[in-house]
């Protein structure tokens, strides 16, 4: 439980850092001038840097680049929260629901059937396709 609290505390600290950076009076002028559209390219750059770090196998770089990518998620969420569209909490709830929905072999496997990798991948794609149709 102590580790859960540490994760929660650190995550909340990062959210507060982004909120402070976006503060209109005491924040960062550059951060305040950004929109989701102007920083979208940075999200792509950070994802590419994660990919490169993984290819190189440098765990220190992977950790740093994942942090940069996480910052992008929170930064975008903060902007959207300020616009009244959604919050980081909405993002987290959405991905939690999606992962549970797309992994019924883990979260709703009452028969305890052992699925093959192929069955899991096919079911994932089927569920993903159904989600797109129902949107």
Image (tube, rainbow, N blue to C red):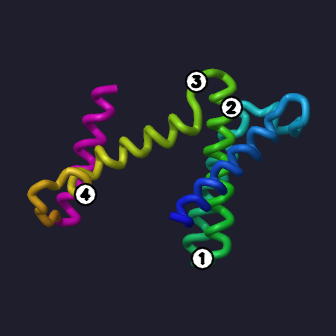
Upstream in sequence: badge 2 or badge 1: 1
Mark 4–mark 1 distance (CA, rounded to whole Å): 32 Å
Mark 2–mark 4 distance (CA, rounded to whole Å): 34 Å
Q: Tell me whether circle 1 and circle 3 mark residues in contact (CB < 8 Å).
A: no
Mark 3–mark 4 distance (CA, rounded to whole Å): 32 Å
Could you tell whether 49 is left or right of 112 in the image?
right
Mark 2–mark 3 distance (CA, rounded to whole Å): 9 Å
Mark 2–mark 1 distance (CA, rounded to whole Å): 33 Å
Q: Position of residue 91 (x, y in %)?
A: 51, 38
Of helix, strand and loop, which mostly describes the magenta segment? helix
Q: Name the image quarter holding the C terminus.
A: top left
Which region is colored magenta? Answer: 116-135
Could you tell whether 81 is left or right of 101 in the image?
right
Upstream in sequence: badge 2 or badge 3: 2
Upstream in sequence: badge 1 or badge 3: 1
Mark 1–mark 3 distance (CA, rounded to whole Å): 38 Å
Q: Position of residue 118 (x, y in %)?
A: 20, 62
Q: Picture quarter containing residue 98?
A: top left
> Would you name the residue on which mark 4 appears?
106
Establish if 34 lies above or below 124: above
Upstream in sequence: badge 2 or badge 4: 2
* Residue at disc 1, secondary structure: helix
* Residue at disc 4, secondary structure: helix
Upstream in sequence: badge 3 or badge 4: 3
**Mark carried by residue 37:** none
> Would you name the residue on which mark 2 appears?
79
> Would you name the residue on which mark 1 appears?
56
**Numbered disc in front, either 1 or 3:** 3
> Would you name the residue on which mark 3 appears?
85
Residues 61 and 71: in front is: 71
């Amino acid at each position: 439980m102590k580790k859960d609290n540490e994760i929660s505390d650190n995550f909340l600290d990062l959210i507060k850092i982004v909120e402070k950076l976006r503060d209109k009076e005491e924040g960062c002028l550059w951060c305040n001038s950004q929109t989701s559209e102007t920083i979208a390219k940075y999200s792509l750059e950070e994802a590419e840097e994660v990919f490169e770090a993984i290819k190189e196998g440098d765990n220190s770089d992977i950790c740093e680049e994942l942090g940069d990518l996480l910052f992008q998620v929170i930064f975008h969420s903060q902007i959207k929260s300020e616009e009244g569209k959604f919050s980081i909490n909405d993002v987290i709830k959405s991905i939690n629901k999606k992962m549970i929905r797309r992994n019924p072999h883990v979260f709703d496997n009452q028969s305890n059937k052992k699925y093959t990798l192929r069955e899991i991948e096919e079911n994932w794609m089927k569920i993903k396709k159904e989600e797109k149709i129902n949107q």
